[in-house]
């Protein structure tokens, strides 16, 4: 018999709501996993990616991870892991550093035997690299085989890659696939292309207010087949207050509902619907502070629109969009990309790759004019010493829009501190 803890999406370094306490919460949850592994005498901890929230973690985040890995190492519990989309870098990964210190094993195409199970790894694979991906997994004589990988896979919700295709193309017939990326724990048994258990362990802390279920990890046992059990973690309390305000009800009703809970040191998430009076989020947050909450967040789903300021035409919505695009004064390159995304007949699954190819073409042709906006083309010559530069607006080239591979998370971006380090500082 072989028993392992299957965990992932620990997101160390995520300072949710800009609170240092939340950053510490993510580390403490990882510590709990390690403590459970030691106390439960498991054979290994298997991490399915996104150990860190960012590819450039700060020094305290790295030191925190090292302290947890040392706890496992001192107890003789191997730490097997892969690289997720949040932490992946173009060069050497942080996981490589931990492996060089003897504190982790990076899973790959060669089997790593733990008891009677051979573990393999497949780091997060971007869409552009999936077609024609070769699976060079080496054979093993182990009783069971398990693949550890990271991504959003069908047949689960939100999947953009069918795990059955991966299994069909693999030279190894896996008995289990241990997944990361989806923060919601899910388990399914499939029969095609062969019998296998597919499971997400979920995240160890709530990275989003949408993650209402208890946080935890999987305990996977290989004996007379594969058995997947759920284990919970003691994480910071989230209090969810959902209101349907009736006419005449407002801030007092919201306060009353919050007051029905013990919110001391909790994250309070208030969601408002209904026909009641307008509610100022600041007033709700102030009340949460008075009650001792760590942080209070308010989402008012009601839409209050001043119809006198909105002009609507149903004559030709496509033309209305095109007119608005023209008013933005985008560069030829930006307009070309907009056309590809919005109006072309390129299949949805190929849009990302097509846009990437278009941008590469512009760059390779060194066509500077393609990236010059209409406003810049019509601006006075730049040799006028008194001329001020044109205001910079958001364009398709500098919007910073990135598709996140997880059903996501709060939008707070952590500020980068002076204690950021690179791997080269350690090697």
Image (spheres, rainbow, N blue to C red):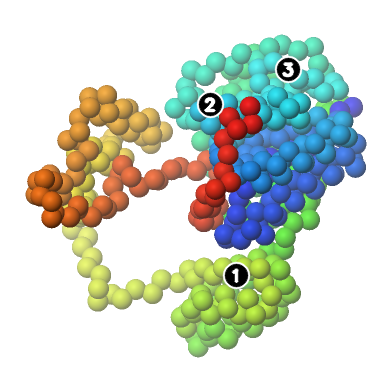
Q: Is residue 336 left or right of residue 131?
A: left
Query: Which disc, if any, is residue 91?
Result: 2
* Mark-to-mark CA distance, 2 and 1: 39 Å
**Residue occupying image coordinates x 83% and y 32%:** 73
Q: Which residue is mark 3?
A: 111
Crowd around label 1: few <14 · some 14–19 · many ≥20 (10 Å): many
**Which structural element holds mark 2?**
loop
Query: Which mark is drawn over residue 187?
Result: none
Q: In terms of depth relative to the viewer, which is nearer, 98 or 421? A: 421
Q: Earlier in the sequence, mark 3 or mark 2?
A: 2
Q: Which residue is mark 1?
A: 296
For the C terminus, the quadrant is top right
Answer with the quarter of the image where residue 199 lies: top right
Secondary structure, mark 1, is strand
Q: Label 2 neighbourhood size at 10 Å, few (<14), some (14-19), many (20+)?
A: few
Q: Nearer the viewer, mark 2 or mark 1?
A: 2
N-terminal of the two: label 2 or label 1?
2
316 to the left or right of 4? left
Q: Residue furthest front?
A: 385
Q: Is residue 336 visible?
A: no
Judging depth in this view, the residue of 235 and 251 nearest the camera is 235
Q: Residue at point 79% right, 50% down?
A: 232
Q: Earlier in the sequence, mark 1 or mark 3?
A: 3
Q: Nearer the viewer, mark 1 or mark 3?
A: 1
Residue 223 appears left or right of 104: right
Q: CA distance from mark 1 to mark 3?
A: 47 Å
What x and y, as percent, mark residue 309? 25, 73
CB-based contact (under 8 Å), mark 1 and mark 3:
no
């Amino acid at each position: 018999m072989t028993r392992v803890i299957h965990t992932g999406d620990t997101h160390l370094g995520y300072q949710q709501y800009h609170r240092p306490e939340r950053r510490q919460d993510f580390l403490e949850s990882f510590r709990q996993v390690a403590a459970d592994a030691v106390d439960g005498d498991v054979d290994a901890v298997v991490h399915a990616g996104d150990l860190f929230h960012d590819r450039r973690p700060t020094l305290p985040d790295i030191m925190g991870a090292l302290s947890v890995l040392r706890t496992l190492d001192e107890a003789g519990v191997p730490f097997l892991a892969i690289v997720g989309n949040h932490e992946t870098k173009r060069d050497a990964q942080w996981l490589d550093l931990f492996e060089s210190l003897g504190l982790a094993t990076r899973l790959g195409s060669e089997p790593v035997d733990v008891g009677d199970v051979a573990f393999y790894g497949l780091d997060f694979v971007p869409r552009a690299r999936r077609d024609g991906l070769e699976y060079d997994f080496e054979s093993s004589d182990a009783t069971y085989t398990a693949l550890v990988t990271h991504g959003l896979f069908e047949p689960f919700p939100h999947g953009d890659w069918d795990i059955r295709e991966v299994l069909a193309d693999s030279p190894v017939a896996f008995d289990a696939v241990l997944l990361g990326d989806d923060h919601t724990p899910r388990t399914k048994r499939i029969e095609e292309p062969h019998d296998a258990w597919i499971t997400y362990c979920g995240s160890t802390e709530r990275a989003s207010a949408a993650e209402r279920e208890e946080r935890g990890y999987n305990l996977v046992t290989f004996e007379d087949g594969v058995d997947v059990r759920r284990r919970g973690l003691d994480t910071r309390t989230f209090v969810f207050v959902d209101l349907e305000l009736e006419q005449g009800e407002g801030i007092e009703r919201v306060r009353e509902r919050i007051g029905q809970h013990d919110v001391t040191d909790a994250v309070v998430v208030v969601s408002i619907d209904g026909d009641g009076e307008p509610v100022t989020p600041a007033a709700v947050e102030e009340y949460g502070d008075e009650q001792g909450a760590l942080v209070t967040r308010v989402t008012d789903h009601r839409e209050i629109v001043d119809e006198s300021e909105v002009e609507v035409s149903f004559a030709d919505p496509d033309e209305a969009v095109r007119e608005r695009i023209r008013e933005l004064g985008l560069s030829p390159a930006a307009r070309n990309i907009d056309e590809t995304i919005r109006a072309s007949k390129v299949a949805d699954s190929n849009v990302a790759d097509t846009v990437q190819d278009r941008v590469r073409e512009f760059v390779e042709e060194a066509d500077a004019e393609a990236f010059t906006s209409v406003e810049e083309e019509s601006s006075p010559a730049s040799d006028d010493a008194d001329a001020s530069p044109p205001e910079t607006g958001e364009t398709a080239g500098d919007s910073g829009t990135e598709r996140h591979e997880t059903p996501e998370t709060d939008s707070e971006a952590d500020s980068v501190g002076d204690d950021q380090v690179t791997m080269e500082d350690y090697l």
